[in-house]
Amino acid sequence: MARRAISPLTRAYQRNLKALTKATLGSSKRIANQVQRAAAKQLKPPPGRGDWLPGVALGPAGARRYHLYRPPELQLKLGEKLPLVVMLHGCGQTGRDFAISTRMNRIAAREGFMVLYPEQDRIANAQGCWNWYDRRSGKADAEAATLMAAIDQALMLYPLDRDRVALAGLSAGASMAALLATRYPLRFKAVAMHSGVAPGAARSPATALGAMRGQHVPPMPATAVGKAMGAAAVFATLPPLLVLHGDADTVVSASNASSTAAVWAVATGARAGAMRTVQRGKRHPMRITDFTRRGRVAVTLCEIAGLGHAWSGGAPSMLFTDAAGPDASKLVWAFAARQFRLGAGERTP
């Protein structure tokens, strides 16, 4: 039986199909290799001595990975426990990126505390942002509860002092830090917001962009502030807050800094003192205002001249950092350490 002749059109189609299959397989292999390299990079500890301990916590928002930095050569006395600083990264970052860019681990190794780096799941947010704004749907509160599960897990597994826990974040991480502090005010001795949105300024994705531009600032009456922030209570229950923000920030309006300080001050009954300007060497100058109540600082507002949407004083090789700014990591730790000393002897529930 004679073989049926293949038309030139069919032959061309087969050649193209073969070439397309080969190209697709090659592309898939390259993509798989890229994903594998990226995953291996994230598993690699940040530069420097100490342990980079992985973990996973389960909560209402599902599972979230985290890493705990433990300083090298710890020699703790029997029963001794260390302070904990929780660091919440911004959009487009991972916990490892945040550790490298902030260089908080260097300070932890020198001062003797541990650092927890929770990590957002890209399934929960494609850009890696914490869903701080999505309170109307309950997503933000579920995520906050899951972060608390990660913190509680670290406190249970490692020699950490639950009465000396501080919280800090950048951008979306700063806004999530504010949500955590207002939802669980007695769990933290200090909070630091770097380039974040004013608490209570957004309750849905639709209002988040406006809040980043400085809109939707909560009203000032204390009862309204408490409702907007979702706090369990106001007046003296919120932990002291450090606000860091650049006046050249084009991503999150710098007006959020003063709004945040005002909201927190109203909620804690604090009043503003005189503003002072501080500059260290050739770094960007800072305008600092303390808000106090009964002689205790409730809020410190630090507005940094010339700083954009970046971690001040961070590693120059990383995104979202400005090495020319004052060292935000040192400022965060100094603020937290002061609250730990002032709160010595006070017990959390």
Image (tube, rainbow, N blue to C red):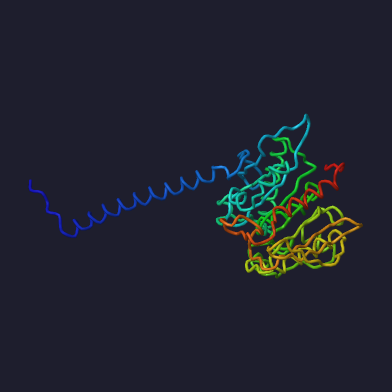
Q: Is residue 144 left or right of residue 46?
A: right
Residue in front for this viewpoint, 122 or 166: 166
Q: Is residue 273 left or right of residue 54?
A: right
Residue in front for this viewpoint, 231 or 46: 46
Vertical comparison of 322 with 341: above or below: below
Residue 313 is situated, as x and y percent measured from the top left of the image, at: 66, 58
Seen as rendered, the residue at the extreme right is 294
Residue 204 is situated, as x and y percent measured from the top left of the image, at: 66, 62
Residue at 76% x, 45% y is 165
Vertical comparison of 201 with 89: above or below: below
Seen as rendered, the residue at the extreme front is 281
**Quarter holding the C terminus?**
top right
Residue at 59% x, 48% y is 96
Vertical comparison of 313 with 349: above or below: below
Residue in front for this viewpoint, 201 or 158: 158
- Image-quadrant location for residue 328: bottom right
Tally of numbered discs: 0
Residue 205 is situated, as x and y percent measured from the top left of the image, at: 63, 62
Seen as rendered, the residue at the extreme left is 1
Seen as rendered, the residue at the extreme top is 78
Q: Is residue 213 left or right of residue 228?
A: left
Residue 280 is situated, as x and y percent measured from the top left of the image, at: 72, 61
Q: Is residue 67 left or right of residue 276?
A: left
- Image-quadrant location for residue 250: bottom right
